[in-house]
Amino acid sequence: MQLDIFADSRDVMLRNDVLDALARRHIADSRQAWQRLADEYPGDDTLPALATLIGTLEEVETAGFTDHGALGAARRTLSEEVGPAAIRLFGQQAGREWLIPCWRKLAQRATSLAFRSDDSDNHAAPLWLIAGEWDAGIQAVARIESWRRMPAPLMWIAHAHYRADGLESTWPLLVELAWLSPRRFATLLADIADTALDALRKKFDTQFEGTGQTADLAWFPAWALIEKAALLPRIREAQPSLHTPPERAARLIAQILDLEKRGDQHELPERRRELRSLHAGLYGTYMKTR
């Protein structure tokens, strides 16, 4: 029995016709190509996923959301149904790129919704970040009153600034986030995956004498200042937070570095004693460098 290559590959050709139309985001061509595939190969296992993406293109609703629940439902559909379908059909990278206009549209529709700390995911800012629209994300956070005192908005704007401007100028926001929410700080480090920052974090995890819990990361800015004194100008730019021991320690180390630079032996011993009273292990780390 001779294999007819062209006949056996017709399903591939029809499937590729649908994918090509979807990649062009042409609704009519996508639907027609899908129907041809369904007519000739009704058992094709990609039909449901293809139909999901076509349905997403056919969704013409552009009105702004009026409640957080509606946004939440749309966001879950995009992340739990449309996203997996796009990645399955196009592959990881191309699938994520195909989804960007979908996330952008969702963010635009969410613009008028106020931020709720107990429902933080349902806000325009994180959607802009998923879409890679860093400036729009920054602007969305800036409209949140007292955003600098809330973990989620602070994490979002730090992420956006990092993507837009790089690590150096983002340090003050990173420092404030570590003091305010070590858990969110850990999440952000994983999201941005900066090589230099990851190396510093790994060294911190190895050397810092803490509990071994995520909460230890509140001390990361103080430790980093000992490890890398060149960070002093950036860490000094961090705005006052909750005046917790980790924050006080970082500011105290900044003072100590200034006193050392000036050669001031009068106040230096007292500042060192203050540091030891805040965290003996951190003080020990500092003294090892002296």
Image (cartoon, grey):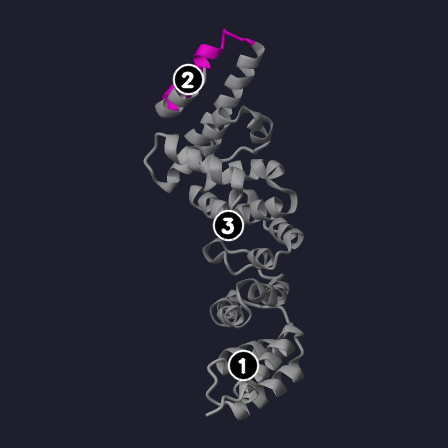
Per the rendering, the mark at residue 226 is none
Ranked by sequence position, the earlier of labels 1 and 3 is 1
Q: Nearer the viewer, residue 139 or 160?
A: 160
Q: Residue furthest front?
A: 1
Q: Which residue corresponds to the image point at 48% horizontal and 37% vertical from the top-left?
A: 199
Q: Nearer the viewer, residue 170 or 98?
A: 98
Q: Nearer the viewer, residue 40 or 157?
A: 40
- Residue type highlighted by circle 2: Met
Quarter location, residue 231: top right
Residue 146 in sight in this render: no
In the displayed structure, would residue 154 be above or below residue 250? below
Image coordinates of residue 26 in percent, x first then y, are 67, 78
Q: What are the residue bounds of the magenta stretch? A: 263-278
The magenta stretch spans residue 7: no
- Residue at numbered disc 2: 287
- Residue at numbered disc 3: 191
Q: Which residue corresponds to the image point at 38% horizontal and 33% vertical from the top-left?
A: 206
Instruction: Check disc 1: other Cα within 10 Å, few if <14, some if 14-19, many if 20+.
Output: some
**Placement of the C terminus among the 4 image quadrants:** top left
- Residue at numbered disc 1: 51
Instruction: Check disc 2: other Cα within 10 Å, few if <14, some if 14-19, many if 20+.
Output: few
Q: Which residue corresponds to the image point at 42% horizontal and 45% vertical from the top-left?
A: 183
Image coordinates of residue 190 in percent, x first then y, are 47, 47
Image coordinates of residue 109 in percent, x first then y, are 62, 66
Secondary element under disc 1, as helix, strand or loop, is helix
